[in-house]
Amino acid sequence: MTLRIFPPVRRAFHRERTSSFLNTDTFWTSTGTFRLLRIDDDVRYMVATAVIALSYFAAAKLGLSLAFTTKQVSAIWPPAGIALAALLLLGPRVWPGVFIGAFLANATTDESLMTALGISFGNTIMGVVGAHLLRTYCRFHITLERTRDVRNFVTVSLLATTISATLGTFNLSLAGLVEWESFGSVWRVWWVGDTLGALLFTPFLLCFSNVRQCCSGLR
């Protein structure tokens, strides 16, 4: 005797089995769930990490060319936007790309390796914490179509960048590159630069990712 499975049950079983093989994280968007850009194997992971590191490094060199308070503090810091966008799109596992890019950018300036490590740690934590708050607690939609998403994004950016500004300024002061009396003024410039970088460049990269997905869906 042949056992027949009703079509709805068969389709549900197929969807469950397929989703278990995909093993990708999801977060909510206005059109349902948006799957994080898939990094299924070590090669793709390494490529993604390298691209993030190189992008961060290049943007950091551009940002450092705009520094005026000290050589390490810029009035606008594009890498903050790159870090936040990368961690929102690809998830927290790509944090090494942010850290490597930040470390290389800082290690090639006039500061010591320990100072570069401390600053890079702050830059990385800023992106990880910001992306985590948006994805976990704010139910953030990367399309930025809702008013609440824009409001939450601005609020989290203002808060998360205090981490990189505080740790960065502290490490510069600890290394003697910034006077402790100037801590407040340097901190403000650092915070403004990171905040502008996040507010200007993260939405641009998220929108660019949305356009690419829409174009690929039309093929």
Image (spheres, rainbow, N blue to C red):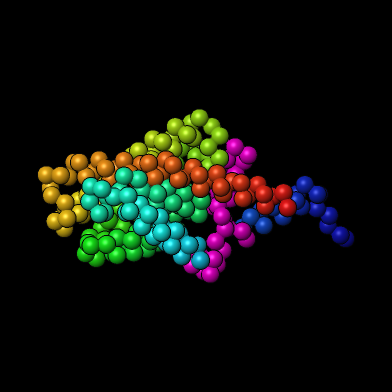
Query: Which residue is nearer to you in this view: 5 or 27?
Result: 27
Instruction: Tell which of 148 and 179 is nearer to you.
Output: 179
At horizontal 62% and vertical 41% (from top left) the residue drawn is: 32
Q: Residue 33's spot in the image, x, y percent? A: 60, 44
x and y percentages locating residue 97 in the rendered image: 42, 61
Drawn side of residue 183 relative to residue 85, left or right: left
In x, y percent, where is residue 96? 40, 62
Report the span colored magenta: 21-46
Front one among 62 and 25: 62
Quarter assignment of residue 134: top left
**Residue 190 visible to the viewer:** yes
User: In the depicted view, which residue is nearer to us: 11 or 183?
Assistant: 183
Total tally of numbered discs in the picture: 0
Q: Is residue 5 left or right of residue 31?
A: right
* The quarter of the displayed image where residue 22 is located: bottom right
Q: Quadrant of the N terminus?
A: bottom right
Q: Residue furthest right?
A: 1
| Residue 131 percent location from the top left of the image | 43, 46
Question: Does residue 99 appear anywhere in the picture?
Answer: no
In the rendered view, does 130 fall on the left or right side of 177?
right
207 lies above or below 113: above
